[in-house]
Image (cartoon, grey):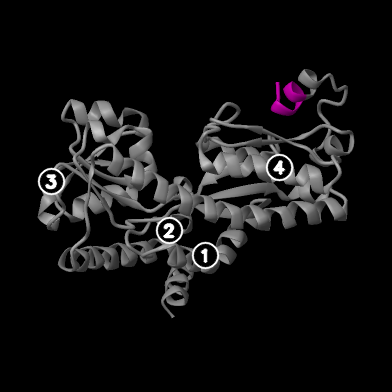
Amino acid sequence: MSFTRRAALAAGAATALAPLGAAQAQGVPWQMATPYPDGNFHTRNTREYVADIEQATGGRLKVQVHSNASLLPMPQIKAGVQRGQVQMGEILLTAYANEDPFFDADAIPFLVRDFAGAKRLAEVQRPFVEARLQRQGVGLLYMVPWPAAGFYTQVPLSSVEVLRGSRFRTFSPMTNRFAALVGANPVLVQAAELAQAFATGIANAMVTSAQTGVDTSAWDYAKVFTPATFSMTKNAVLVSRRAMEALPADQRAAVLDQARRAEERGWRYAEEAQVAAERRLAEKGLQIGTVAPEVQAQFDQISRTMAEEWVARAGEDGRRLLEQLRG
């Protein structure tokens, strides 16, 4: 039984197999899938976005949000939008790097240094991402970053040698490659298993956001957090182009107008989340470190290597993106 039919039956609708546009015309809410829990600032922003859409359309367009991967897991959300299982979905772009290396651009370590740099990257990256999604029948509504990633270690990050030989937790091809370049031993560990991995000695160092450190009580298993702007990956909120094209013009305009507001708000939420999370780590006893210039110089060399490797995978568009970013 298709999701559209299940949703229609649950709502008592008689037209379970109606096309996406027709379903909306008959008053059936749009469906949106996101893998993040309600306490996450991304989900909070998403819920505010769909509430703004409903208000802007006078209640004629409603969107039901399914959070915490309750409808579709992360790897299936983009395909769900493409196939019409859901009209909207939220994904972590880098999670789809195996589909297209261009979705991995913002995961290149140390490519940007702050939120201003991340915003510039998002502006340059957007038309490339939009073009790829459009070929698949998907529209890009907005993108919002995660707070900057930093290092969790047992001793201050006084040199890159601190990471050499460590059991370094990784969660993506990019972090795995970084571990190899610094001479660490990569260990794939999901966020939900971090505390146990550190407690049992499977891992003793990692790079991830301050927010993840708070979420997993990093003060129980690490001693130092060093903000480093390792990367600032982004979430993308997607929409079915077929569903959008079936909307009246004023409703399409509302979806796009409110998306611009959601993007601006989401960037603000990300900055607030970074400050609050780093403060929380310090309050719980983690030493907050700094990256010395000589250490940053070594990181920058690694970044150049990984950027070149990424261009080799992404092709001419990848080279153009980096040229525009650095131009």
Q: Earlier in the sequence, mark 2 or mark 3?
A: 2
Q: Mark 4 points at which residue?
A: 50
Q: Which residue is drawn at 45% across and 45% down?
A: 95
Q: How far apart are marks 3 and 1 (CA)?
A: 36 Å
* Label 2 neighbour load within 10 Å: few <14, some 14-19, many 20+: many
- In this rendering, the label closer to the viewer, 3 or 1: 3
Q: Give the range drawn in magenta.
A: 1-7
Q: Which residue is drawn at 32% across and 59% down?
A: 109
- In this rendering, the label closer to the viewer, 2 or 4: 4
As helix, strand or loop, the secondary structure at mark 4 comes to: helix
In this figure, what is the number of numbered marks?
Answer: 4
Residue 142 appears in view: no
Q: Which of marks 4 and 3 is nearer the N terminus?
A: 4
| 234 within the magenta span | no
As helix, strand or loop, the secondary structure at mark 1 comes to: helix
Q: Mark 1 points at which residue?
A: 125
Residues at badges 2 and 1 in contact (C-beta under 8 Å)?
yes
Q: Name the residue under label 2.
A: 106
* Label 4 neighbour load within 10 Å: few <14, some 14-19, many 20+: many
Q: Distance between the residues labelled 1 and 4?
A: 25 Å
Residues at badges 4 and 3 in contact (C-beta under 8 Å)?
no
Q: Is the magenta stretch mostly helix, strand or loop?
A: helix
Q: Which of marks 2 and 4 is nearer the N terminus?
A: 4
Q: How far apart are marks 2 and 1 (CA)?
A: 9 Å
Q: Mark 3 points at which residue?
A: 155
* Label 1 neighbour load within 10 Å: few <14, some 14-19, many 20+: many
The amino acid at mark 2 is Asp
The amino acid at mark 3 is Val
As helix, strand or loop, the secondary structure at mark 2 comes to: helix
Q: Position of residue 237 (x, y in %)?
A: 61, 48
Q: Distance between the residues labelled 2 and 3?
A: 28 Å
Residue 15 appears in view: yes
